[in-house]
Image (cartoon, helix red, strand yellow):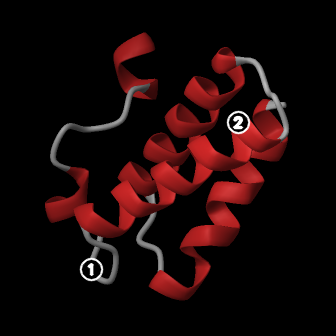
Amino acid sequence: MEARRQSAADYIEAVQVDVTANMRAILVDWLVEVADEYKLVADTLYLAVSYLDRYLSAHPLRRNRLQLLGVGAMLIAA
């Protein structure tokens, strides 16, 4: 059951049409800055990135919704 909840290693190529690996990297860098600005615990950031990857590995997403997904993942993780 745990393996089913993990994100696939190649989800950017397999699932995503509009989002690239570079866009994900920029989003994660931005989330790091947000976590630093608001002095969040590191585990919150790790959990948010995990939520982000798990969602992206299961659902195609348009690029104009990527930052909204990142903020939502951070909110849920906090």
**Which quarter of the rendered picture does the C terminus lie within?**
top right
Which amino acid lies under the numbered mark 2 shown in the image of this protein? Asp
Which amino acid lies under the numbered mark 1 shown in the image of this protein? Val
For mark 1, give the secondary structure: loop
* Residue position marked by numbered label 2 in the rendering: 36
Disc 2 and disc 1 in contact, CB within 8 angstroms: no
Does residue 25 lie above or below 15 as drawn?
Answer: above
* Residue position marked by numbered label 1 in the rendering: 17
Identify the residue at image location x=70%, y=36%: 36
**Residue 44 x, y percent position in the rendering:** 71, 25
Residue that protrudes farthest toward the front in the picture: 37
Does residue 71 lie above or below 54 as drawn?
Answer: below
Does residue 48 lie above or below 26 as drawn?
Answer: above
**Residue 2 x, y percent position in the rendering:** 43, 12
Identify the residue at image location x=48%, y=49%: 28
Q: Quadrant of residue 42?
A: top right
Identify the residue at image location x=26%, y=65%: 22
Q: Which is more toward the observer, 15 or 49?
A: 49
